[in-house]
Image (spheres, rainbow, N blue to C red):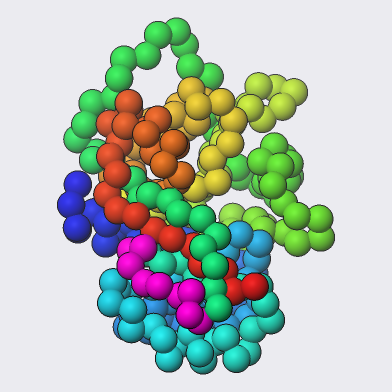
Amino acid sequence: MDEESLTAAIANSVHWYDAVMSAHGLAVEHRKNAWLCKEKVPPFYSNMITLDRFGSQGPLITEIGSTLLRPWTIKDSYNSIDLVERGFDVLFDAEWFGRSPDQNWPSRTGQAPPVQTVRSESELERWVEAWGETPIGRPVFVPGLLQNDEVEFVYVDRGSYVSAGLVANRSDDVIGITNAFGSPREVMNCIHHLSHRYDLAVVGYGRKRQVEFLTGFGFRQIGKLRIWINR
């Protein structure tokens, strides 16, 4: 894992944002140094993703800030810019992680429950309910995402309930994972399932403690990021 892996992880994040915004019917812009959406975005998503380390996004921040109601956020992909003087606070810090496809997985004991893929709107509703993070009246994952062949909602079905799941987003040579829920063991079953099926590197980001847990499964930290909020 190196700078190339970090670049791939950031590009995958942009790819995922494109998919989510498209499903919500929102327009986006791809600038040289940033990804932008000047409309109100779904919960948990930012209006800007920085694409370089150099703090060159100042004019763009002014541009979109003049059109947006607060609060809105910026994903500082390299944790390299200071936005305090622009009226932003740190919402949280996180770490990018990655895992090469050629690494062996730790041996598992016992039979793992099968991992399934959401195929219908009713299954998506069940997945979303199990995820349990949707703010009242503000849907995040909408049926339009099921039309995107590069997006996959996977889950472990225990019959009467969904016990774990995550979203996978394929772009170029990597699979990005996000919105994982459930027991760590079953989440890892979902990741192993995707890695084995596609034979691609797996990337994503999480809090420090989450990334430390993943190192036991061959993942490593490949960079840092910060989410800024303009309240």
Instruction: Please identify the quarter of the rendering in which residue 93 is found.
Output: bottom left
* Above-or-below relation of 84 to 134: below
Q: Is residue 115 above or below residue 93?
A: above
Residue 222 against residue 32 in the figure, above or below:
above
Give 126 or 103, whichever is nearer the viewer. 103
Relative to 22, 131 lies left or right: right
Q: Is residue 80 magenta?
A: yes
On the image, which quarter does residue 231 sit in? bottom right
Rendered position, 126 above or below 50 = above
Q: Where is residue 117 in the image (x, y as percent from the top left)?
A: 55, 39
Q: Main secondary structure of the magenta part?
A: loop
Residue 23 in view here: yes
Q: Quadrant of residue 147?
A: bottom right
The residue stretch that appears in magenta: 78-86
Image position of 30 (left or right of 174): right
Residue shown at the point (46%, 44%) measured from the top left = 207
Instruction: From the top left corner, tell me how far across and down residue 212 is, in percent.
Output: 37, 34
Residue 214 coordinates in the image, percent (x, y): 37, 33
Q: Which of 48 and 212 is in front in this view?
A: 212
